[in-house]
Amino acid sequence: MILDQLIGFFSSDMSIDLGTANTLVLVKGRGIIINEPSVVAIQKNKNGKTRILAVGQEDKNMLGKTPGSIEAIRPMKDGVIADFDITEKMIRYFIEKAHKRKSFLRPRILICVPYGLTQVERKAVRESAMSAGAREVFLIEEPMAAAIGANLPVREPVGSLVVDIGGGTTEIGVVSLGGLVISKSIRTAGDKIDMAIVDYIKKKYNLLIGERAGEEIKIEIGATIPLDEPLISTVKGRDQVSGLLSSIEFTSEDVRDATKEPIKEIADALKDVLEIMPPDLAGDIVENGVVLTGGGALIRGLDKYLSDIIKLPVYIAEEPLLAVAKGTGKALEEIELLQQLANE
């Protein structure tokens, strides 16, 4: 134990929010130092060997724009590892970028994972981080990290309900006395909302746009309730009929219509959790409400939309995009909690 503490003093332990859309890295004592897209550009040579060309923000700019020999991929799909080798290389890249030196004591790494990951998937995450240079790897489930990062009283005998809407999954968790009492994970989140916008524009306007454009529309004018003054955006793409480049005027009402199905799926999942809530915790949730975290929490009016459906107060956490990363960082500060997580 003393040796571990001594080694920990000299190594830069870190936590990683390994998200489908973005990866955030927090180094103990330094805070969040990396916040970049979970994207890797690879090039395969004639022998079939893979070479990493770019990772993160530099690579996201390549999405949909690469020549045939280069492929920009997202190794995380629906919150889980879709490509083990590329994920390992991506984690290694972020670890090396965080330390900015070639020789260092290997760090302990705490990685946030979606609730409900299988043992095989958990093993894949651990092995990726170990192969990338970790001394020890701990896993923490997303709803718990989100609750800690949102400053909810996770260790008290009080029920707190958090909904984390990320890129690949929406994680819903009821936390009390330092553990998850109820958890639910659905693979409906930011990516599915983006694709709903892409498909809607294709069907209604015969205009082809990319997934990245769908995400930009969601951020710029996305809304789940009618706005006093609808927002308008000019969307550019390729006309399916003529094959020529074209543009349309797209409004926040269009986005609301386009995304109603995935948004409803999130609302239904929240209702499912509320329906199986233990009576003693139900009173706490009625009193304290529901907290939203993740990028999806920033969609205009989502808090009011959900509140109208479940008839409970719904709040957006402070800095919802960073809640999970901050939660993993706080967990990293507590050695006892890390050991507890390791034994789960």
Image (cartoon, helix red, strand yellow):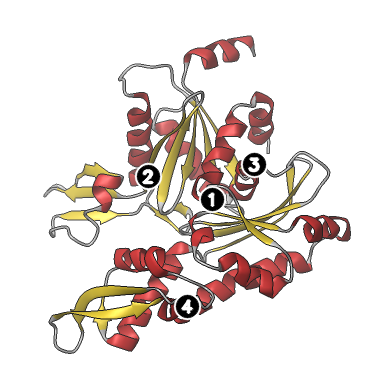
Residue labelled with disc 3: 148
User: Measured from the top left, where is residue 245 in percent x and y?
Assistant: 14, 78
For label 1, the residue is 320
Mark 1 or mark 2: whose residue is earlier in sequence: 2
Where residue 34 appears, as percent x and y from the top left, is 39, 37
Nearer to us in this view, 230 or 341: 230
As measured in the structure, the alpha-carbon distance from the residue carrying label 2 to the one carrying label 4 is 34 Å
Residue on which the image places disc 4 = 256
Determine the secondary structure under disc 3: helix
State the CA–CA distance, disc 1 to disc 2: 25 Å
Q: Secondary structure at mark 2?
A: helix
Q: Amino acid at mark 2?
A: Thr
The residue mark sitting in front, 3 or 2, is 3
| Closest to the observer, 254 or 280 | 254
The mark nearer the N terminus, 3 or 1, is 3
Instruction: Sort mark 4 into few (<14), some (14-19) or many (20+) by Cα contacts within 10 Å.
Output: many
